[in-house]
Image (tube, rainbow, N blue to C red):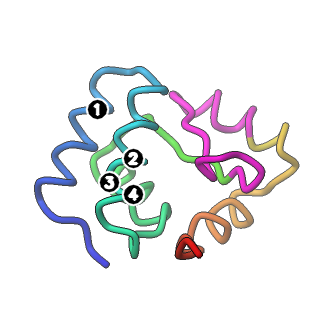
Amino acid sequence: MQLSPKQRHRLLMAVRVRDAAWVAAVIEDVVAANPETALLEIDQEFRDAGSQTYLIAAPGTAAGFEVALGAFAFRRRLVAAGMTLAQNRAALAVKPSSPA
């Protein structure tokens, strides 16, 4: 499901703060309000805006993702997770499962 203009605006304003925890909180809020949104859609919004904020799939965490600020931090986290760019994108594309 596509993000609304208001959700897009909230995400891009959060990115301007350059605080990974704040960005993650806004992403969690957007996903809670729009459960059909895949993390890849949010990451693509960042790419389209020319942002240096990246999402890394982290299925073992409560949120299911991590936020990296900057390309170097993103690459370093991908290597630490043992993922390629393609694997990360595939993992982000998975829509969140509905709670039981």
* Residue name at image x 41 percent, y 36 percent: 25
Left or right, 88 with respect to 1, comes to right
For discs 1 and 3, the disc positioned in front in the rendered view: 3
Looking at marks 4 and 1 on the same chain, the residue that comes earlier in the sequence is marked by 1
Residue 14's mark?
1
Residue type highlighted by circle 1? Ala
Q: Are marks 4 and 3 in contact (CB under 8 Å)?
A: yes
Left or right, 62 with respect to 6, comes to right
Q: Which residue is mark 2?
A: 27
Q: Estimate the spatial distance between the alpha carbons at disc 4 and disc 3, rounded to whole Å.
A: 9 Å
Residue 64 lies in the magenta-colored region? yes
- Expressed as whole percent of the image width and height from the top left, the position of residue 56 reads 63, 48
Quadrant for residue 88, please give it: bottom right
Q: Which residues are magenta?
A: 58-77
Q: Are marks 1 and 2 in contact (CB under 8 Å)?
A: yes
Looking at marks 1 and 3 on the same chain, the residue that comes earlier in the sequence is marked by 1
Residue type highlighted by circle 2? Ile
Q: Estimate the spatial distance between the alpha carbons at disc 4 and disc 1, rounded to whole Å.
A: 12 Å
Residue 30's mark?
3
Numbered-mark total: 4
